[in-house]
Image: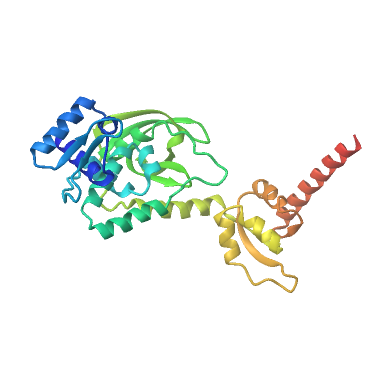
Amino acid sequence: MRASRLLSILIALQFRGRVTAKALAEEFEVSVRTIYRDIDALSIAGIPVYGDCGPGGGFQLVEGYQTRLTGLNPEEAEALLLIGMPDEAVALGLGAATQRARGKVLATLPQATKGAADRLVDRFHLDTAEWYRSMRPVPFLVQVTRAVLDLRTLRLGYQSWKARQEWLVEPRGIVLKAGQWYLVAFGRGKTCIFNIADIYALEVNLETCVVPADFDLAEWWHSALEQFEERLRPERAELRLSPIGLQRLRLLGDFAGNAIAAASEPDSDGWTRLTLPVESLDATAPLLLGLGPEVDVLEPAELREAVRNLAVAVAKRIEGHVMT
């Protein structure tokens, strides 16, 4: 542990210039006295580090000195792919390891390449949350992440949209989609998806599991999403929309955007006909009513009637309020 800390301190000095003992102590969660001993150890090992006293003081390396050492420890190796995703790394409990790994990787690069890498970090920011939505608290994310990496089985208390249930599962991986963290795990004879924010109780078991050699998390996830979309919207609605209607429809999600992309060319009035995958009439009619006069529901007739009935009910309610 100390050897890893010494290397991390060396790399921190190389990239930051002057750093105070207090800042190093806070970063590595040790005492200031321990940092002083570490600095002495680096000096004894021949590292040209010196310190300045006073308010503007701190430790730094002799100008021009550069190490080619990296020495990634297992935790830093796990965090390596999260470089450039600092918020997600912190959420997974790998924030400090990611910072150390980034420093060690950059330490191996020539100065010109290092500058280009730094510019990429400074000019590129990844924000995974959806517009107008705050991130849900995910209290068990760090524990689930550790269990996934250590291949530990999990006992979950899970609140689905149907009811609370207990699950004993073998983790397969974690997916971040649209600001939501999901656990992919095998339980009850099938591979399932759990929204980690909906886990209300968690027990990490000592028992380990084995992920099948042919299991590919990304491939499985994409296939599962396609199947989910097909089950979620098994019906089809024939619509005709104005240009404004197309803009409003697109806001409903990717399924609507895909339908628009596959639509025919606009007719002489500028309206576009398309086929939209939909759920039940009860779920679809209010969505189409929200498009206002910018949509014609062509088929099925039951959906057209449902939208008409909703519009009549809304008009009557508004007229009632006006009269009173």
Nearer-the-camera pick, 250 or 135: 135
Instruction: Count the marks.
Output: 0
Nearer-the-camera pick, 149 or 165: 149
Q: Write the residue at 43% across / 41% down.
A: 181
- Name the spot of residue 188 as percent of width and height, x first: 37, 38
Location of the N terminus (image quadrant)? top left
Q: Write the residue at 71% across / 67% down.
A: 271
Residue 282 seen in this snapshot: yes
Q: Is residue 71 left or right of residue 91?
A: left
Q: Write the residue at 52% across / 34% down.
A: 162
Q: Is residue 166 left or right of residue 324?
A: left
Q: Is residue 50 left or right of residue 114?
A: left
Nearer-the-camera pick, 136 or 151: 136
Residue 1 seen in this snapshot: no
- Name the spot of residue 163 as percent of width and height, x first: 51, 31
Res 300 quadrant in image: bottom right
Res 206 quadrant in image: top left
Q: Residue furthest bottom?
A: 268
- Name the spot of residue 216 as percent of width and height, x first: 32, 53
